[in-house]
Image (cartoon, rainbow, N blue to C red):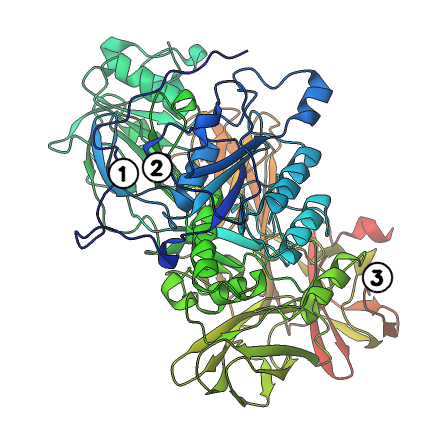
Amino acid sequence: TPATPPAAASGEGDKPAATGLAGRPAKPGPGRGAGMVIGVLDTGIWPESASFAKKMPAPATWRGTCQTGVAFVAEHCNGKIVGARYFADSWLADGGSVPEGEFLSPRDASGHGTHTASTAAGLPISNVTIDGRRFGPVSGVAPDAQIAVYKVLWGGMGYDADIIAGIDAAVADGVQVINFSIGSQLGDWEANTPIGIAFLNATLSGVFVAASAGNTGIVSGAISNAAPWVTTVGAAVTNLDEATIKLGDGTKLVGGSLDALPGGDARPMVFGDQAGSPDLGAVYCEPGSLDAAKIKGKVVACALSDTFASAAEVKEKGGAAMVLFDPVGNYRVNSIYNFPVVYLPTEKQAGTLFNYLMRHPTDAKASVRTGGDGSSVPGVPSVADFSSTGPDKVTLGVFKPDLVAPGSDIIAAVSPAGNFGRQYDAYSGTSMASPYVAGAAAILHATHPDWSPGRIASALRTTATDTVGTSSPLDQGSGFINLAGATDPGLVIEPTAAELVAFSETAEPDGKELNLPAISLREYDGTRPVTLTRTLTNVGTARETYRSSVFGLTGMKVTVSPASVTLAPGKSATVTITVRRGSAPWDRYVTGSITWHGRTHTARIPVAARPWGIAARPYADDGEEFARMTNGAFGQVQPGFTGPLAGRSTGYTPMQRESYSIPAGVYGGVFDPKASGVKKVDFTVPANTAGIIVEANTDDPNTNLDLYLYKGDTLIYSSDRYWTSAEQAYKFLPEPGRYTAYVFAQVPGGPVVDVDLGYAIVGRNAKYAGATLTLPSTAERNQGFNFTLKPKKPLAEGDFWAYTEYSTNGTVVPGNLVYTQQSSWQ
């Protein structure tokens, strides 16, 4: 059983602020969440934090309790923490105890729950100090709201049964808002999960639910908590927190840092792998791996692993600063190391740094300073690269994420037990963004006590603003939270309870007809119009006329009828929205919005539509098009339309082959276009090209090749994730222009690597060697059919490529890139 923890002393300046921004006493009120209780389902809370140091009476509607346990007594529920419970029955039944280091009580061992609770409703703190450095003031979004703690995670994990028990308890206790910064790896895998149904019951009971979207931005569609009655929150970068490293050759790399950096003149720089024992993990600067004599006073470059352990090793051995890099790229996430650390998150930066160090093994230099040129992100606010993006891969017609909120480098209260004794620390994640929205919802509920959870959600979404760098709702949802606008949205669009219940009772629900403030058409039939309705309700105080307009949605034909509506306060009107594909591309998302403009209010809903051509995809356009490339001897198509079917092909063109000998570079190197061990080959892609396919292979099984396809400085495709001597990169319907393929011998099997490079540029309207396309005369939506594309004459040795195209009732649907060899027909 863990011992009762010491009451860690607050850092310098970690005291509740007594005045408002103008210097006058801050009075409790609805604009600060007074009277609201936010239920936080998480890892518990550290009750001694200054962020919760206020005695407050419980609201009249509060029905909860203060459950005591290890290191948690009744006095810890001081009113600011109005109640606390813990749920560990499943843990105890499964293993007999909670994980080592945990407290069998509402006390937080890790810091995650304390951080989310203080982000939502922590008291204003005038000046937070971490490891002796001042980081300025912090405050919860709704500092007058109260916190109810529901500890459902133990060692960072939880069972569904315990979580559902926590949700049900929060509703029974009388919370108005729930924050759920918990998700599943790679997002939801089914609709209407038991946890989702528990949140539906909470919503029907009048409780607003905010939940994190997940931190799997590397792949699209990995959305957690995607139920339509949950407000699913992505993360935005709102603080640059940049740092710049200038290499000895003048190259500047802009990364991130939350630490004090030395600045000044360049210092000697060394790669950890060259300054210690490779067998002990010197490449990662692992504990005990570095030689103090080789790094003292130097900037040390370390590959990403256990970053805090690496920083401690460099600090202990006398290094001046540490530069972290990840050879395959990673998310932009900063931490406070209490030591000069700069993090370079991108694969391109890693390649530049690594290869500079390889060229300068004994005379590398670098300076590190705080600040940058803004190039580390598109701007602020911008969608964080780790934030999970849409579409919802599980359910058609449901739009996720709903919006984004601050979630990068967020400083808030934590548990000293899990954070090096710190009372405050910087965390990043959609877990940090969700409580921001929960706090905002508490303010809206306090300001508008009669608003339902659906109205609150609509107000937050229809008033959100575009982020910098993208306006795609697949990334930002409705946009960046705008609390000031949400307090007076003019219009709301909310589903009825009956709609939500019906959705929850359907095995394979489609949410496009739900009265939600968004339109998602992930796999619609592009040969037919789609008709939807939305009901608009005036929640303002005056009669107002709203006129609709359509933005974006290039190529599509979208109409709203009636085009304008006039509504008195409290009145509603239903509009019909008709969506036609028009000239929009098949199997590609087109995004935009519909906005209703009034005299004093504006309400915007995002629209994302992708017509299903030859294959359904549960992710965005950045994912692999597995069905796009197929074998001509046994091709298969899964159409998204129904009707008569015809097709044509270009016939087959041979893949061109060239042989190259690449002098070996660094064994286990990191890619950079200028690195040794790289072969560069340029291609010109003309207009109306169906596809470009590039392949690289070697007969040496001891060589690992990587292949990169660029257009200018933009990476189009990378084939570098697995050890293989054969790689392929491609682009379907590429833009015309100059393309470059880079073949990289990442692990050379000898001093020279012999590589065979093949490429095919397939014209969309070209006529190559004749081939016969055999396919059925009709197509039915979601019913796969087989086809063959047989050469009319025997083919020469080697690989051949072709393009097929289909049509139905005069509508052309782009088809497949088809490959074959003569052996397939013998």
Tell me which residue sits at (28%, 36%) in the image. 258
Badge 3 or badge 1: first in the primary sequence: 1
Q: Crowding at label 2, few (<14), some or many (≥20) Cα neighbours within 10 Å?
A: some
**Can residue 133 be seen in this snapshot?**
yes
Where is residue 529, by image quadrant? Answer: bottom right
Residue 54: image tag: 2
Tell me which residue sits at (42%, 57%) in the image. 443
Mark 3 or mark 1: which is in front? 1
Horizontal and vertical percent position of residue 61: 54, 49
In the foreground, 528 or 571: 571
Horizontal side, residue 304 vs residue 179: left or right: left
**Can residue 795 be seen in this snapshot?**
no
Give the quarter of the figure containing the N terminus: top right
Q: Say above or below: 550 vs 279.
A: below
Mark 2 or mark 3: which is in front? 2
Tell me which residue sits at (27%, 13%) in the image. 316
Horizontal and vertical percent position of residue 714: 42, 55
Q: Secondary structure at mark 1?
A: loop
Mark 1 — residue?
16
Residue type highlighted by circle 3: Gly
Residue 784: image tag: 3
Residue 76: image tag: none
* Contact (Cβ within 8 Å) of mark 2 with mark 3: no
Badge 2 or badge 3: first in the primary sequence: 2
In the foreground, 44 or 801: 44
Horizontal side, residue 623 vs residue 126: left or right: right
Mark 1 or mark 2: which is in front? 2
Q: Crowding at label 1, few (<14), some or many (≥20) Cα neighbours within 10 Å?
A: many
* Contact (Cβ within 8 Å) of mark 3 with mark 1: no
